[in-house]
Structures are given as C-alpha cells and as structure tokens.
C-alpha cells in the first residue's frame, strides 16, 4: 500500500481499498479489513511470472480502434486461470481477478495515475461489477421523486448531458455512464456510482455557455470530469428503486419531445443492446443476465424517449412532467 496506508472508497455499493489515492473518488470513513475489491495501483500481480505472458490466450478484442486501426483494448486469459489481463492501446494495463475481488494496474512512464483512472473508474469497474454478477446498463441515472429514472443509449445519445441538465434543476444524480442494478424481492434498485459526471466540451457549452470549462479527466482525453459538489449538484448516496428506463434516440429535427412505451419484447432487446460489457461474460453469466432483464421489463416501465428540436431545458420539463411525483411511473407498464 502507499506510504500513508491504504485509501478506502465506496462505489456502486462496493467497498474499495486502494494502494493510492484515486482521482475523482471521495475517500470513505469506513475502513474494512475485507473490502469487496482490492485495487493495486502502479503494481502488477507479484505471483504472476512475466515470462509466461506468451501463453496467455486472447479472450476479447475491442471493435473500436485507434488511429492506426489497432483495437482500443484486448483482454487475455492469463496462464494463471484466476486472472484476466486487459491491455489498452496506450500502454495502460490491468489484471483482474475473475471473481471480481482485485485489480492491478501499470502504466507507461509518461502517464500518471490520473490517466489510469480514466479506465479504472469506467470500464474496469464496469467489468469487475459484471464479473461479480451485477447487471449494468450503459446509462446515466437521476432521482425523480422517490424513484430513479435511467437514461440508456449508445455513445453520443446524450445520457450524461440529460442527467446533468436534470441535476441543474435540483434532482439528485445517482450514476453516470454505468448504472448498476440489483434485484431485491422482485424490485430493482440502482446503486450510487461516483460524485461526478463526464461531459464533452460541447455538452458543457450547452449546459453552461461558452465561458464555462471543466477539468479534463486526463491529459489523454478531451472529455471532462465535473464534480457535482463543486457545481452545487446533488449526489444520491443511497440505493434507490428503479422507476423507469428511457431509451434515448437521436434528437429529432422537428417536433416536440415524446415518449412511447415499449413492449416487453422490445424492451428486452433494447436493454440487452445497452447492457454494459455483455460480450465479456461467460455463457452462464449471460443466461443469468437475460433472466434478470426479462423480469425487469415486466416490473419496470421502459420508454423510447425522443428529444424534440427544442432546447435542452424543454426536454427536462417534458421528462419532469412525465416521470415526476404526482404522475404515475406505471403508465408505461404492461
């Protein structure tokens, strides 16, 4: 661990123990001797011999590529079958225990822990959650009244922008980019993620105007990380029941914002498409996820949300009118 001992955090309902401070997370007062996940930064597994990497088996290759046409990342099954190795195109490397209880990370000499945190707090924690059997949506989520409304969709659909805009109107943000879901006695709950949102410069301008800028997540990324506390936005620190999922579509060129209820079959197809890291799961875990999502679409209303050609605030007004207290979240239920 670090010179001052380990640093403890809480994210996605899990206790984390890190060898170093993780930029973007707020340390927790709870110091567990048996955390859910141990994070070893600037370190590789000491029990793993470097000379046996040639025996590692390619498990997954990202369809996204860098400017050279190389996969953005690759995942390998290590010769030690308890581990997966995740190699990013820029030289950042992770080793993950396949039971989701530990992760190690190294990076090039010209990088810092802030650069590595770009991956750690996004895809790596997402993969660890999946390895632990937690279903995750590629979504952002906000508390409206006493329920969570999640906004799912492909990259660029406006998930983080919509959530932040609602946050600016006083609603607590519970998660950005990854929404972790747990089933409890037939109900579905969303766990708090981390007290910041990630926004592209054009989204910041849309929300705050041209004069506003936010710190970059890292030197290698144009996307910025915006602290909720520093911008007077609320962070929901306890799990909240999921009330609805909105599947975002591209903004319409004409017309007003609208929401259409999806059938169970349409909803299941949409949620599977927007599940986080499903391609990384073994067959047994995929089956369990399919079964959970099948139950979810029969208990939680799923909507197709079409943003009109009006301003972002008009979309927020529409969402509040559709999903805020006083109007039934069950309107779209089958």
Image (cartoon, rainbow, N blue to C red):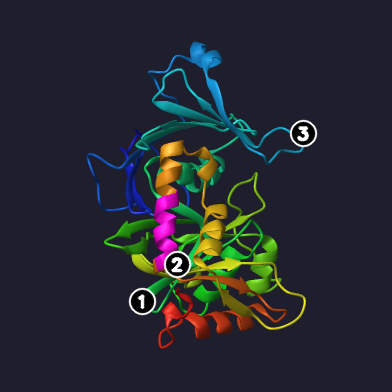
**What is the residue that sits farthest to the left in this orientation?**
33
Q: Are marks 2 and 1 in contact (CB under 8 Å)?
A: no
* Magenta-colored stretch includes residue 294: yes
Q: Earlier in the sequence, mark 2 or mark 3?
A: 3
Mark 1 to mark 3 CA distance (whole Å): 48 Å
The secondary structure that most of the magenta stretch takes on is: helix
Q: Are marks 2 and 3 in contact (CB under 8 Å)?
A: no
Residue at x 55%, y 70% (from the top left corner): 262
* Magenta-colored stretch includes residue 295: yes
For label 3, the residue is: 68
Q: Earlier in the sequence, mark 1 or mark 3?
A: 3
Residue 73 percent across, percent down from the top left: 61, 35
Question: Which corner quadrant of the image does residue 40 belong to?
Answer: top left
Q: Are marks 1 and 3 in contact (CB under 8 Å)?
A: no
For label 1, the residue is: 146
Q: Residues within 10 Å of mark 2 (few under 14, many from 20)?
A: few
Mark 2 to mark 3 CA distance (whole Å): 39 Å
Q: Earlier in the sequence, mark 2 or mark 1?
A: 1
Q: Is residue 50 above or below residue 314?
A: above
For label 2, the residue is: 229
State the SS at label 1. Answer: loop
Q: Is residue 310 above or below residue 289?
A: below
Q: Is residue 226 visible?
A: no
- The answer to whether residue 47 is left or right of residue 90 is left
Numbered range of the magenta stretch = 290-298
Residue at x 23%, y 44% (from the top left corner): 32
State the SS at label 3. Answer: loop
**What is the residue that sits farthest to the top in this orientation?**
51
Indicate the quadrant containing the C terminus: top left, top right, bottom left or bottom right. Answer: bottom left
- The mark tally for this picture is 3
């Amino acid at each position: 661990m670090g010179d001052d001992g380990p640093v403890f955090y809480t994210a996605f309902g899990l206790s984390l123990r890190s060898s170093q401070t993780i930029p973007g997370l707020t340390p927790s007062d709870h110091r567990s001797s048996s955390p859910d996940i141990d994070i070893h930064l600037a370190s590789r597994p000491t029990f793993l011999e470097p000379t046996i990497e040639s025996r590692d088996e390619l498990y997954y290759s990202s369809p996204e590529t860098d400017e050279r046409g190389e996969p953005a990342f690759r995942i390998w099954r290590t010769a030690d079958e308890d581990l997966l190795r995740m190699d990013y195109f820029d030289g950042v490397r992770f080793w993950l225990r396949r039971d989701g209880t530990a992760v190690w990370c190294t990076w090039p000499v010209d990088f810092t822990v802030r650069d590595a945190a770009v991956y750690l707090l996004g895809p790596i924690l997402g993969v660890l959650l999946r390895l632990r059997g937690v279903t995750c949506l590629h979504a952002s989520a906000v508390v409206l009244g006493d329920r969570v409304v999640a906004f799912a969709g492909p990259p660029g659909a406006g998930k983080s922008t919509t959530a932040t805009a609602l946050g600016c109107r006083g609603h607590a943000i519970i998660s950005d980019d990854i929404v972790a879901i747990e089933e409890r006695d037939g109900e579905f709950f969303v766990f708090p993620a981390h007290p910041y949102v990630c926004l592209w410069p054009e989204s910041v301008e849309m929300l705050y105007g041209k004069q506003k800028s936010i710190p970059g997540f890292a030197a290698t990324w144009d996307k910025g990380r915006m602290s909720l506390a520093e911008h007077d936005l609320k962070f929901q620190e306890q799990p909240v029941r999921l009330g609805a999922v909105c599947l975002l579509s591209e903004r319409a060129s004409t017309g007003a914002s609208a929401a259409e209820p999806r059938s169970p079959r349409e909803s299941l197809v949409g949620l599977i498409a927007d599940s986080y890291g499903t391609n990384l799961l073994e067959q047994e875990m995929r089956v369990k996820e399919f079964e959970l999502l099948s139950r979810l679409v029969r208990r939680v209303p799923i909507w197709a949300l079409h943003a009109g050609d009006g301003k972002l605030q008009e979309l927020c007004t529409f969402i509040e009118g559709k999903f805020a207290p006083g109007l039934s979240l069950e309107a779209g239920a089958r």
